[in-house]
Each structure stands twice: as C-alpha cells, then as structure tokens.
Image: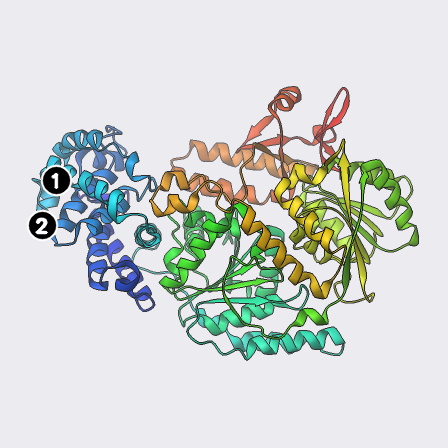
Amino acid sequence: MALEVLSHPDKKLIDHLNGVEKKSLKKLDRISQYIDWKEVFGYKREEIRKALSIASKWHDIGKATVHFQKKIRGERANSKLSRHALLSALYTFDLLQKAGLDDYLSFIGYLIVKAHHAGLKDLNEYDYCEEEEFLKKQIKYIIPEFFTLHGIDIDIDTSKIYKKIRRIQLLWEESYGNETSHYFLIKLLFSILTSSDREDVVLGVENFPLDTSEVSQEKLDKFMEKFTYDTCINKIRKEFHEEVKNYSCNKENMFAISAPTGIGKTLANIRLALKLKEHDGIIVYALPLINIIEQTAEISKKIFGDENILEYHHLSEIAKDEETNYGNYLKSLQYEDLRRKTFNYPFIVTTFVSFFEPLIGSSKAIFLHRLVGGVVILDEIQTLPYEKWKITKEVIEFLPKIGVKIIYSTATKPTIFKATEVVKTNYFKHFNRTKIEVKEKLSLDEFSEKIANLIKDGKRTLIIMNTVKSAEKLYENLSLQYDSICYLSSKVLPVHRKERVKKIKNGDYKICVSTQVIEAGVDVSFERVVRDIAPLDSIIQAAGRCNRNSEKGTSKVLVYSIEKEGQLLSKYIYGKLAVDHAQKILGKFPEIEEKNYHYVVNEYFKNISNYANIDKGSYTEKLKKLFFSQLSSFRIIENQSSISFLLLINEEIEEKFNKLLEEANALEKSDIDRYKKSLLISIKLKEFSPYIVSTIIREDEIAEMGAFETRFGLAVIRKESVENFYHPVFGLHFQKPQGVFV
C-alpha cells in the first residue's frame, strides 16, 4: 500500500476497526451478566459474541477504497463511490456466513452495519437489485492489499450473496418475524456498535469513567438527616419512606409505588432504585415534562453531587469546560456530548420523549445497552397519552428481560401497566386535603361572572382553563376588579413564567389564571382550585396545586363545564372520548374526597382501556414486524405544525445573539467538520432557551404576518419589534390591523 489506509483524518482504519471491536465486546461482556441470551433471544452467548465481534471488527471495511481514501484526505472523489456502509455490510455478511453463524444472525449483522450511519429502515424498503448493481461497480475500487493483509477474501459472489439476503428477508417476514425479541436484539446490538464507533473516534483507547458507587444509600440517608417530623403530615411521610426503605426485593423486575401526591415519592423512588440496581447499573428517572425534570434534578444533585447527575432533554445544556486552546475546547464538547447521549452518568433525569422515542423506531438509541443492570423510574406514567399506552407498555415490559428493572411511580396508575406493589399501607386514607365538587355547565361570560363573585371571599385561588383564548378573556375580566392577579400559559416566555411562579410562591398574587401549564411540576399551593372540565387525571393533577401541605383542612376543587355554542371547550383540546368518560365518572360521584381519588381514577382508566384505541398508529404491530421507518413517526406528543420564536427582549440578549451570528459566520468559513460546527451552534443556542417560545400557527396566519428573520430554525424577533409579537401579560401574540390574534 502506497498510502496508509485511514478511517478518519487522524486515524488508521485498522486501529479504528480494532478499537470498535474491543469496545463492543467489553460492552457485551458487561451486559451478559444480566441477560440469558438463549432464553430471551434464542441464541447462545457465544454466538452473539462471535456475530458482534465480526460486525464491529469490519463495520468500516468499506472505507478501504480508492474513492473513500481520496475523500478522507480532502481530495476530489466520487461522492457516491466513496460511501462505505453498504460495502462494509456486504463483506460483513459474507464473513458471518463463513464463520458458521446462522442466516438470521448474519442478516442482523448485515442490517446494523449497513445502517450504522443512516439509521434502520423497514426490511422491504431496501432496493436489493439497485444495491447489488452499485456494489459490483464499487468493488472495483477496493484497495486489495488492505483486504489481503487482514485475511479477507476479495473475490466474493455479490449476486449469490444478495440472492441469499433476499431469501432470508422473505423467510423472516413469513415465519421468523413478528416478535418483540427480534426488534430488541437488533436495537441492542445496534446500540453497542454505534456507541462503540463514536466512542473510538472521540476517546480513542480510553473509556468513559463511570463510578456508580457515588450514587448510594448512604448519601441519601445523610441528605434525609436534616428532615424533621414534627407535624402529622410529615410523620406520615416518614412512615411511607420507611416502608419503601424496608421493602424486601425478591425476583420481581417491575415495581409500583402508588401513593398520594405530596407524600414524598421522589425520594422513595430513588431509595427503591438504589436497592434494585446492580453494582455497575445506572438509574434513569423519566418524567413527563421538562419543568418537572428541573426540580427532580435539583434534588438529585443535592443528594449525590452535580457531577453525578445528567439532566437530559432537548433544552438541557452541555457542561462547558472553556479552554484557551480552541481545539481542546472542541474536543471537550465532543466528549461531553457523547457522554450524555450514551448515558455514561450514574444518575440520569430525562423526559418520556427523550427516553421512549429513541427506543421506538430507526434511531440508534445508543444508550440502550447502558440501561442493562440499571433501573428506570417512570414517574406519572398516567400522563402518557392513552393512544400510546400499548406500544410503551410493550417496550417497558420487554426491558426487564434484558436486565433492566422498572419502577412506576404515581398516585393514579392506569390498570394496563402491571407491576408488584411496593407499598402495602393505604396512605390515601391519611390525605384528605382536597375535595372535588362538580358544578354546572356555563358559558364563558357566565363563568367569568361566577368566578368574580367567588373570589370576593379573599381566598387564594387558581383557575385553570383549557384554551388560551378563554384564559385570556377570563384574566381580562378579573383584572379589571383585582390587582393581585397573574397569568400563566405556554405562550409566556420561560424566563417570565419562572418569575411569576416565584412570586406565586412568595404570596405576591391572590389569583392566578392559567392554562394546563401549571398542572404538573409547578410546586405551588392555593387555598382553592377552579378548573374547566378535563380528563379525570388532569383534574387530579390540578387538585395537586391545592392545599398541598394540609394548610387549610379540606379545600375545594371546583369543576365547571364551560361551553361555547353548545360544545364543551375541553373537547377541542382533549377530544370527545376522554372528556365523556370524565363526565360519566363525575356524574356518578359529584363530590369526591381525596382519600377516594385513586378508586375513582382506576375506574376511569379502566373505561378508557376498554373503549379507547390505545395503539393509535398500530405501532406495536409495526415494532414486531421490524417496520423501523414507519416506527420513526412515533411521537409521545403528536407533531403539529409549529414555529419556535426567539424574542430578543432587551439589548443584552440582542447583543448576545448578534455575537452568536458572528461566531456562526466564522465557523461556516472555517475547515471544522459539519458535526463540530453543529455541536458548537446547538450549545450556544441552548443559552437562549429562556427566551424561546413555540406556537401552532395556521398557514393563512403565517402569510398575514409577513416575512420573519429566520436563523437556526427559529423565527427571530428583534428588540424593536417585540411589542408587535409579545404581550406583557399573555406572551406570544401577533398584531394585525383588526387587533390581536394568536
């Protein structure tokens, strides 16, 4: 060979191949402590190890071509002929077959190598005839000396191999497929291969340090020493925590902590997870919303230290070690970015979106192998949309088969999610802080008048509305009579929402009008809550914002049904089925005390399970049939056409943004690769998250607004134009001649 064969600009191909194989096998050996491969997947551990060894060792063999070597050196090359994944997959399949591995395991090796950059696809989506013809051309450009040196036969029969691959695919679809285990075998090996591939580039021969002993029972005990138990409610909290602490774990893998809101489930969840996890296992704490994550992460950091906690979601920032040397700074960013994505932290706090969506579909889910031996806490599982219950249940219930223990934590768990109950004592009977009272059906004007009279008694009152427009109108009416009033919705910038919540906690506001944004994760307590009718679990969540610490005996949660032209406003937001079932339950029980909430909610969820389509999109069937591309449309929250706005509300923020634009322009002209450029920009953009708000806008509204300055996928509103787009109380609005519209 006249030139050294490279995998990356600064790395020899053979070093990369050996490095990825070594890292892959190390991961496999770790997780094999907790997986019975034969029982779960039908293959012996030795067979899986041999298959992964070959796939990881030769996953980039297709880089040993003339065109790729020109490309990696910055020389002119044919872009199509310089691709490497498909050629690597072809030789990997041939090597797996020659090693005596069965057809299906060989096919899995072929799939994960072919997809290790682009992502997995439906099996019937590949055009094998086109692939075969292309490879016959590409093989002419391989570097024979490299193949010969490493004992790989250059002369392979491409037509014969593809005939075999097509036959395996057809057999898979006809007889072998339709099992969740097949899906997870592919995803698990794919996770190991792709994470090892990335780690070898970023870390070289090193590995991420991970000392899980830093997250311990002893540290939790020390944290809890400062608590006092001098009140009745605190004594109940102590009793509850002691019951979880003394729980004796047998051979179960799925657990539930079912207890009232405000009893201290967060610490109890962590306590149980510490008991359950293996010595090298991590804890993943998954929650519905980002604003809840911030609170849970803060508690976790106080217990175990900032350095042991990863807060992982699309708005979380990468910890930056600002180096004077720009090259070292880039390397540290790459290191931390990959460490986060591979879950190489002992304790991770994340969202349902960031946890479930990579596990379902074509995504690499490079953290999947890291879950093995660990514990996943699913907090407030009932907040998952009921249309997604079946597919998430399928995923959740398979994870214990690969050594992942599950904890459900909720006051209102849907009956479809089965688990061993950890808490035997009925703590609900001790909590009677609130009582739901069902009120009449009213128009918005009638409701406004009713509320205006109600709050004359001076009680601190939270009113939760289902639509932004109804919330704004109610606020406008009430603010004419009351000064101590605030407004919250998702259209208010996060920086302003945070300020308002702080003032609520300080008692600066007597009245708060809000949308559903306040229902979960906002630790506030009012003397009374009024809510427009909603699904029953949302009403229970609203009740959690009332009398949280039994300050006022039993407080009322009043549920009205607000209608417009004979239609309930709630049905525009939640749909007919969920609201109808809530009405049926509330019709049977017009007054419900907190101690009975869980009984009533169980009946509600049972009805939803019986009558609702809990697998909208047939994702469970698609998973079993390996329809990876079709699964990629899976979203916890259905996508709607929305625009994210960055509002430069003051000179400081605008100046900071202009500086970012200058840095982006300089980066564009630099020779830094695309991934590093993207990483640098994304890190900088996250600093602006308190000033970003998203909204759903119709096409005709977009046309009326005119052209925006768009940068980095955001609509940017400059300081001089902010007043046209942002109302000081209601947040994001757009001015047009007729007035304000949203």
Q: Quadrant of the N terminus?
A: top left
Q: Is residue 666 above or below residue 388?
A: above
- Give the class, few, some or many, for how many residues have Cα within 10 Å of label 2's Cα (few <14, many ≥20): few
Q: Secondary structure at mark 2?
A: loop
Q: Position of residue 236 (x, y in %)?
A: 69, 75
Q: Secondary structure at mark 1?
A: loop
Please state which amino acid type lies under the numbered disc 2.
Answer: Gly
Is 195 or 631 nearer to us in this picture? 631
Question: Is residue 536 shown left or right of residue 327?
Answer: right
* Quarter of the image where one finds residue 662: top right
Question: Is residue 153 shown left or right of residue 487?
Answer: left
Question: Which residue: 22% across, 46% down?
Answer: 107
Question: Which residue: 26% across, 54% down?
Answer: 20
Q: Is residue 5 above or below residue 322?
A: above
First along the sequence among labels 1 and 2: 1
Residue tagged 1: 2
* Quarter of the image where one finds residue 209: bottom left
Q: Position of residue 111 (x, y in %)?
A: 26, 44
Q: Specify whether residue 351 is in view.
A: yes
Q: Position of residue 485 (x, y in %)?
A: 84, 47
Please state which amino acid type lies under the numbered disc 1.
Answer: Ala
Is 466 or 54 nearer to us in this picture? 466
Is 309 or 598 nearer to us in this picture? 598
Question: Is residue 558 shown left or right of residue 349?
Answer: right
Is 592 or 77 nearer to us in this picture? 592
